[in-house]
Each structure stands twice: as C-alpha cells, then as structure tokens.
Amino acid sequence: MKRRAFLAAGGLALGAGCSDLLADSKKTEQSPPPEECAIDPSVTPGTSDWTSKRGGPKNTGSVPSDDVPAPPLRIDWTYTMGGHTGVSPPVVAHETVYTTNLDREVHAVDAKTGEHRWQANVSVSAAAAVAGGRVFVADDGSVTALDAMSGEQRWRTDSEAGAHLLSGGVQATERTVFVSGQMFLAAFDASTGEGRWTFTTGLEVESRPAIADGTVYVGSDDTYLYALDAETGERRWRYKTDGRVSCDPVVTRDIVYVGSEEGTLYALDARSGNERWRKEVGTVGHLAVDGGHVYVGFGGQYGPTMDAFTAASGTACWSSEEYVSGYASGIAASSEYLYLPVGSLSGSYSVTLGALDPKTGETAWRFPNSNARFNNGPAVADGAVYAAGMGTDGLTVARFVPKD
C-alpha cells in the first residue's frame, strides 16, 4: 500500500441514518466576534462545481451560497466501490462525482442519482482534478488523463524527472496539469500530456498548487512559498516561512494565504509576495476563504481545531473545537454554513459530517450515526454535499441533501 493511501485509509467507517438538528456537545464560552467580523456574502470566490480537492484551481474551498443546502440533511444515495485501501475526497463536475480508491481505480457516478457511469483501472495515489472535459490523476511516476464523460484514457505519461518521484497532488486548468513532486513541481500540456516545464525546489512538494491570473503558487518542505509563471515555470517571487509548507495555499483576487507546520498563517500580496499580515496559530492543516473570512483547520489533536480571521486584516473572529482534521478532510465554506468533518456524539474517536455557523463558529448541525466517519471531503455542489468514507461493504461515497 502506498504511503499516502495508507494515511488516507486509517480509521475510516461509514454508516447510514439521519436526524434533525442536534445540540453542540463542545460549546465553549467566548465573546461575540468584533463588528469587523461580519460576513460579507458578496465576497464569494467559489464556483458551482467542485473540480479539485480544495474546490477548484484557487484552492479556496468556497461555495456560492445559492449552491449550499441548509441542514438538517439526509443521505440521498450511496455508492460503494469496495476495497479497503482508501477513498479520496470526491470532486464534482459535469453533474458527475469523481473519486478514486487511492490504488488502481477511478470511478464516475451520476451526481443526482448515484448511478455508476464508468470505472477506469489506472494507478492513482491522490484525488483527481477535472478541467477541459478531462479527469487528471497521478501516481508515484505517471500522470493520466481520462475523458470525463466516458473514462477512456486520452494520454498517460511518465514524469520527466523519473519514476517514483511524483507526490501525487494534482491541479489543473484547461491548458495545463500541475503535479507535485519530491523536489519539484511539474507542468504538463492538458491536451497531449507533453511535459512543459519543471521547477526545482529544495525539498519535497507535498502541497497542491493554487493557480490564478497566470501565476502558480506552491509551497515546499524547504519552508518557501513560490510564485511561478504558469506558462514558463519561471520564478516570480518566493517567501520564506518559519517551517515546512505542506498545506495547500489559497489565492483570492489579490492575496495568497499559506500556513507553515510551525504554526503561522501568512497573508501575502499575490503580485509581489510582500507580507500583508501574519498570525501565530497551530499547525496549519487546511485553509478555506469565503465571505471575507479565512478559516484555518489545524492538524493538532488538542485545543481549538479551527480559527476564523478576517481575510483582509487577520482580525481574530472565533475558535471552534469541532473540526476533525485528517489527510483527506477539508472545509467547504460559504456565507451560510461551513461543511466539514466534526466529532460525532457517538464517541470520542468517531467522525461525522457537520456544519458550523460562519458568523460564530457554533455547531449548526451534525449527522449522527454510531458508525459514521465522514472525514473524506466534503465537496459541495448544486445544492448537495458529497462526502466519502468506508462502510461495511467497502469504500463509499454519499450524497447529502436537505430533509423533506
């Protein structure tokens, strides 16, 4: 089993069931957020589809409010792949849910009905990315492009840097596929698979790049965040942090956000790399930006597991102890709800799908089930939430919709 697949597979379980709103079991007393922490629903960098692990090429994890379902939710359908290696966070495009078993299968499922559309048997070690009518996946040594509608292989190419060097983090635009590597970021032509350029870093690139306005932003274990020309791979600027940068950076219109494993969140000018502000927080695991807020999910096991700050100035708004960080987990943010993995009421080690109020950080809802561990994803698209885990029959993807 691959290292990343092993990490993603640990401790997953999935059950069925549903209920109404539940009381929050982990409320903490805190002062009301400052006035400047008010949510601005017009500041929504997300799109209706969820085309990569963090929502899209910018990694914002942001969802337009019109596409966000209001809890309580119920399971609409489940699709079981079988197997026990691990299941990647689902991505959603073309009214289709795409997921992998982090081994040798890519699956496409109808987003509305759960009907299986196709399966492709290719080696894969990370979540897919969708762009330009193609689904892109990578393993340790190759990148594969599949037709999004049929699953037919369009091309497959070995990394120019050599086999077994790709980390597997994939991001894509209609022109280019970007794949993280052990000491580099590689770019491939999205139509042909031809290698376009390779940018070398000092240590492994574990993070998935963010792309906006012709610039690629990527972090490295060498402690730097790099801004590269998307066409040529030429370095535009770099910024040194205080630790490894393994979480995915997020870029909005003019600011790029990045966190270090030493516990600092940085807001940098997207054009120059100059620091706008920084905050000492916990080990930064996942980021999302929406409604004028940046949400920070921590990788630690103790104390608050999520903080909210104003995106422009870094003013602290609230903290929550509900978020459960994991290799395949993340945050789907909107001005109405934050969907994310939270602790289940069934036990201290159980995880389920939940929703927080972005204004206060209080728990608005959680999906209760004694066996539920919906900690892969979530993805939010077209009025539904998609999450993955492992059920009694194997790896499973579920669609959640509002209760009737």
Image (cartoon, rainbow, N blue to C red):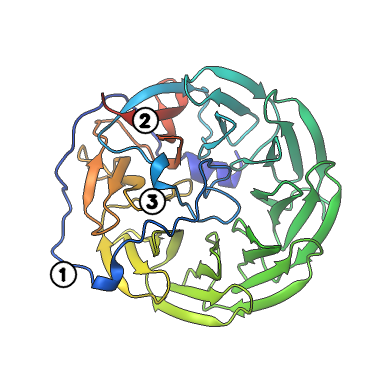
In contact (CB < 8 Å): disc 2 and disc 1: no
Pick the residue in front: 116 or 182.
Answer: 116
Residue at numbered disc 2: 400
The percent position of residue 227, horizontal first and vertical second, equals 67, 70
User: Which residue type carries mark 2?
Assistant: Phe
The percent position of residue 139, horizontal first and vertical second, equals 69, 42
Q: What residue appears at the point 40 percent right and 77 percent down from the top-left corner?
A: 313
Q: Secondary structure at mark 3?
A: loop
Q: What residue appears at the point 52 percent right and 17 percent down from the top-left corner?
A: 115
> Looking at the rendered structure, which numbered label has been put on residue 31?
1
Q: Nearer the viewer, mark 3 or mark 2?
A: 3
Pick the residue in front: 166 or 270.
Answer: 270
Q: Is residue 97 visible?
A: yes
> How far apart are the alpha carbons under marks 3 and 1?
22 Å
Quadrant for residue 95, please give it: top right
Q: What residue appears at the point 63 percent right and 79 percent down from the top-left corner?
A: 272
| 78 vs 288: above or below | above
Residue at numbered disc 3: 334
> How far apart are the alpha carbons under marks 3 and 2?
17 Å
Q: Secondary structure at mark 1?
A: loop
Label 3 neighbour load within 10 Å: few <14, some 14-19, many 20+:
many
Mark found first going from the N terminus, 2 or 1: 1
Label 2 neighbour load within 10 Å: few <14, some 14-19, many 20+:
many
Q: Secondary structure at mark 2?
A: strand
Q: Nearer the viewer, mark 3 or mark 1?
A: 3
